[in-house]
Image (cartoon, helix red, strand yellow):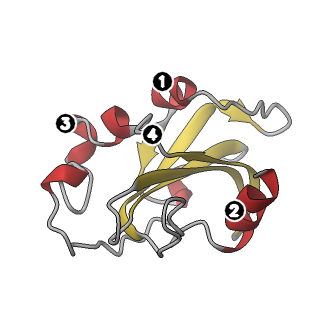
């Protein structure tokens, strides 16, 4: 199973783990991680850490030099309705991203955080996945 997860992370992070259909992006957001600095990165696997420490930003340029960032992509499978969230912790270096950690949450661990009232106002689609139409897909750009 670990091999499958590594292959998925490398090549097809947008495939549904239930039916292997390509999933649609329903939300994409960039966050600063003020607690994590160059030379002092500590990987965390608990969603509670990220819920407590992430600060939303619009562009990578808003992240101070030497501070880690976190990109969150929420997916939904058009075939079976399965939802997943990919969290990628990275250090923005010049025009590249030095990825330290990729995590996948497939049991709604970050739903309350991503779709809270203050976060939903920042979303291009505005509401929780249950409120979205079946074929409504966004094409956000937070890495530009």
The CA distance from mark 4 to mark 1 is 19 Å
Q: Is residue 28 above or below residue 23?
A: above
Residues packed near mark 3 inside 10 Å, few (<14), some (14 to 19) or many (20 plus): few
Who is closer to the viewer here, 87 or 32? Answer: 87
Query: In the picture provided, is 132 more to the left or to the right than 2?
Result: left
Could you tell which of marks 3 and 4 lies nearer the N-terminus? Answer: 4
Q: Is residue 92 above or below residue 12?
A: above
Secondary structure beneath label 1? helix
Q: Which residue is mark 4?
A: 107
Residue at image x 13%, y 53%? 131
Q: Quadrant of residue 15?
A: bottom right
The numbered disc on residue 52 is 1
Q: Are marks 4 and 1 in contact (CB under 8 Å)?
A: no
Residue 98 visible to an observer of this rendering: no
Residue at image x 38%, y 66%? 77
Query: In the picture provided, is 30 more to the left or to the right than 132?
Result: right
Could you tell which of marks 2 and 4 lies nearer the N-terminus? Answer: 2
Q: Which residue is mark 2?
A: 9
Q: Which residue is mark 3?
A: 117
Q: Is residue 88 above or below residue 117?
A: below
Secondary structure beneath label 2? helix
Residues packed near mark 2 inside 10 Å, few (<14), some (14 to 19) or many (20 plus): some
């Amino acid at each position: 199973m670990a091999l499958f997860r590594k292959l998925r992370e490398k090549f097809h992070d947008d495939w549904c783990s239930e039916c292997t259909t390509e999933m649609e992006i329903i939300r994409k957001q960039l966050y600063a991680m003020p607690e994590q600095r160059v030379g002092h990165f500590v990987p965390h696997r608990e969603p509670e850490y990220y819920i407590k420490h992430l600060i939303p930003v619009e562009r990578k340029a808003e992240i101070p030099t030497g501070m880690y960032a976190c990109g969150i992509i929420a997916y939904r499978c058009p075939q079976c309705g399965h939802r997943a969230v990919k969290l990628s912790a990275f250090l923005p270096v010049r025009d590249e991203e030095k990825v330290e950690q990729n995590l996948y949450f497939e049991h709604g661990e970050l739903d309350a955080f991503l779709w809270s009232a203050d976060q939903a106002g920042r979303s291009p689609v505005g509401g929780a996945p249950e409120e979205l139409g079946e074929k409504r897909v966004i094409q956000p750009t937070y890495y530009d």
